[in-house]
């Protein structure tokens, strides 16, 4: 039977200091150019607001609120199918802030009545 000769395998050697890539020292890093200043977003009064579509819930709510008697929260909830907190959020966020309409809130017999004041 022939004998099998095994070769000795030497362990992997690490690179010596002379074989590594030299580090450049004494140089300052190149600074990044400054970012341009951010422009402030336009104020609510200067933003362009598109008119709502006639069949949208926004248009329905505006039509209901334009009535001189106004509307109570349950009426707006039924017209839109939204929950109470969603209707109140829409009134403060969209009607007052985005559309910049004069929303008036009055208490009548313990219930809030909301309406949009005419431009007089």
Image: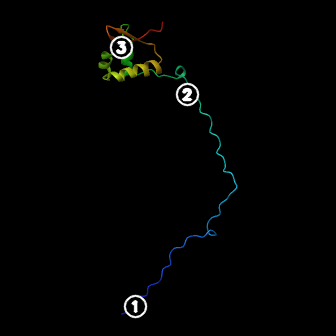
Packing grade of label 2 (10 A; few <14, some 14-19, many >=20) is few
| Viewer-nearest residue: 110 or 33 | 110
Percent coordinates x, y for residue 109 in the rendering? 31, 7
Furthest-right residue in view?
26
Look at discs 1 and 3 and give the one toward the viewer. Answer: 1
Percent coordinates x, y for residue 81 in the rendering? 30, 23
What's the CA distance linking mark 2 and mark 1? 85 Å
| Viewer-nearest residue: 41 or 55 | 41
Q: Which residue is mark 1?
A: 3
Look at discs 2 and 1 and give the one toward the viewer. Answer: 1
Tell me which corner region of the image, top left, top right, bottom left or bottom right, holds residue 103.
top left
Q: As drawn, is 49 to the left or to the right of 57?
A: right
How many marks the image carries: the answer is 3
Q: Which residue is mark 2?
A: 41
Q: Earlier in the sequence, mark 2 or mark 1?
A: 1
Q: Earlier in the sequence, mark 2 or mark 3?
A: 2
Q: Residue at x 40, y 91 (%)?
A: 3
Q: Earlier in the sequence, mark 1 or mark 3?
A: 1
Q: As drawn, is 9 to the left or to the right of 56?
A: right
Furthest-bottom residue in view?
1
What's the CA distance linking mark 1 and mark 3? 101 Å
- Quadrant (top left, top right, bottom left, bottom right) of the N terminus: bottom left
Up-down relation of residue 76 to residue 119 (above or below) = below
Q: Residue at x 35, y 23 (%)?
A: 85
Q: Secondary structure at mark 2?
A: loop
Packing grade of label 3 (10 A; few <14, some 14-19, many >=20) is many
What's the CA distance linking mark 2 and mark 3? 32 Å
Q: Which residue is mark 3?
A: 64
Q: Residue at x 59, y 30 (%)?
A: 39
Q: Are marks 2 and 1 in contact (CB under 8 Å)?
A: no
């Amino acid at each position: 039977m022939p004998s099998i000769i095994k070769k000795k395998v030497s362990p992997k050697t690490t690179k010596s200091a002379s074989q590594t890539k030299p580090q450049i020292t004494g140089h300052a890093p190149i600074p990044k150019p400054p970012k341009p200043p951010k422009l402030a977003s336009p104020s609510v009064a200067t933003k362009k607001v598109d008119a709502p579509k006639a069949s949208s819930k926004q248009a329905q709510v505006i039509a209901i609120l334009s009535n001189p008697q106004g509307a109570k929260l349950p009426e707006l909830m039924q017209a839109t199918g939204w929950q109470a907190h969603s209707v109140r959020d829409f009134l403060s966020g969209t009607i007052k802030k985005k559309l910049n309409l004069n929303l008036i809130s009055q208490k009548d017999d313990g219930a809030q009545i909301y309406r949009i004041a005419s431009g007089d």
